[in-house]
Image (cartoon, rainbow, N blue to C red):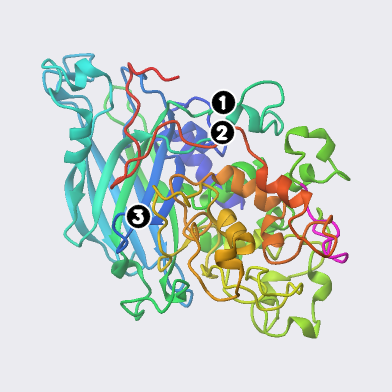
Amino acid sequence: MKAFVSKLLTVALCLWGVAASASSHREAPLIANDPLADNTDVYAFVSPDNPNMVTIIANYIPAELPHGGPNYHTFGENIRYEIHIDNNAAVAGDEVTYRFTFMRVNEDPTTFFNIRLGARNLRTTYTCERSMDGGQTWTTILSGGEVPPPNIGPRSINGPVGLNTTYEQLIADAIESATTGERIYCGPADDPFFVDLGGVFDLGNLPRQNGPSRDGIGQTNVHTIAIQVPISTLRKAGAPATPTSILDPDYVIGVWASASRRAMRTLSTTGDDPTDAGAWVQVSRLGMPLTNEAVIPIGFKDYWNSLTPYQELADTQMDEFFYNPELALYMDNSLFGGAVPAMAKLRIQRNSLGAFDFGYGKDGLFGLKGNPALAGTALDDAVFGTLLLPGPGKARSVDLWPIFHTGVPNVRPYQLATGKAGNPLAAGKPFIHNFLPNGGDMLRLNMATTPTPRNSPDFSSLGLVQAAVLGLTNPTYNANANLQWIPNMDGFPNGRRLEDDVTRIELQAVSGVVLAAVGLWYDDFNGTNPVTQDLLDVLTYSTGVDENDKPFKTSFPYVATPWSGTETGE
């Protein structure tokens, strides 16, 4: 660990000391001083208007103020921005990687304006390379890609003394087609993440108890790398051209993004550009949302950023933060639940089915270890039991740890309680398979899952939580234990759609909603109706901020138009 932190510190001390304004995206002490290389969010979903394609979005540069001139943000030079895809658990590391590098030019250095008389400062272009062999060889698939300028205001964008165009046209012109079939957009966008930052970091005041909640990153922008990739490029080698079912294991991918800097930066005393040298060092990475912000403690955040998911999976010292997450302390009345009244609806099973305690530091399902009842289930040591039941005192090893580290297999007990007749270990209604166990924290997406139309009345920002509710309670789906497509099976944490309310979903998951979905009901279950008050409390919990501040586009790149420097919002 010390070696990784030492390398990161060397990089951070040499970087420009420009700090972004407060944002949850500034998730680790060192990367907070390098916003141009700071991952904010990653999204991966089957494109709703083109289901033969998967869209992957990696955002960088947190909390960009639209009026932040004269030095507006853009992608940094001497940074490798990369999107990584894993599709084969039998092979170590990534199978597909996209690398983006950017170049910036002042077109008119005689002015302090960013745009004047058709000239841009800084005009940014990029090159995209692709590796299909784990980074051993690279092929340039797009060069000279254009990054739109910041959305400064109508005189700069629309006016004749500016660019004399529209911002929507700039976005359309910046959508490029690579030689290998991908579509790419790199440029500014409204930050699609939504959360009450002020509330969540005010000791868990989410939703706020003393006033209205507020989207802490509303009306701010990010820089987006969006790439739409044919499923045929991403699926596992040898997989059939058509999936065998909506849960085809050969169609599962893991997605994560990173940024890397050279190890050394030398500043000039004459005003020349700094020079960068040395090995490339990963300074930021992201897969699942909120992992480094709300799961990893401060003392490990920089170290976590330095690791790949594959290194993280092998380094078991951080597993404890998932087996017993800090947030669980605030969802338990016997611990500190009473001190966080905003989360009063979120309570963990302490006596599920009268036998299983998932409280902080408790055994969860470990008491079943070696029991013949586990034979053939995912908890059997002959299946995945060594991963999922590693020892006592690891309360959430069967739900939170796999959600963040392996994905979920379509194997008992990871099926909906529908059809289980009260036995959570029995076969139930098949629900999801996005199991890919050779890496750590990544977004895992089963590309065979049918996308839910965004304009459908069934669409829900609660993703798999809402799909589970339908599978357990809706007569269309709970009348049998057969495999059926249920709306929102394509939602987080099966990938991540722009609309998904990931903060709410992850808090519900910490409070045990996944356990309940497979039949490990809440403590107030009386043996008849599992839809108890505790379950209803969890399902109706809201953070106070439930949607983005701008509507998303209905076609690629899907992200909303960036806020203008002169735009005002409600």
What segment is highlighted magenta in the picture?
A: 347-358
Is residue 550 on the magenta stretch?
A: no
Are the residues flagged by discs 1 and 2 in contact, CB closer than 8 Å?
Answer: yes
Cα distance in 3D space between marks 3 and 2 = 24 Å
Residue at image mark 3: 48
Q: Residue at x 64, y 63 (%)?
A: 472
Q: Amino acid at mark 3?
A: Pro
Residue at image mark 2: 545
- Residue density around tag 2, few if under 14, some if 14–19, many if 20 or more, within 10 Å: many
- N-term-proximal mark, 1 vs 3: 3
Q: Return the residue nearer the eye: 457 or 535.
A: 457
Tag shown at residue 214: 1
- Residue density around tag 1, few if under 14, some if 14–19, many if 20 or more, within 10 Å: some
User: Residue 102 is drawn in which quadrant?
Assistant: top left
Q: Return the residue nearer the eye: 541 or 23.
A: 541
Residue 126 % position (x, y): 23, 44
Horizontal side of 329 relative to 262 (left or right) equals right
Q: Give the tally of numbered discs.
A: 3
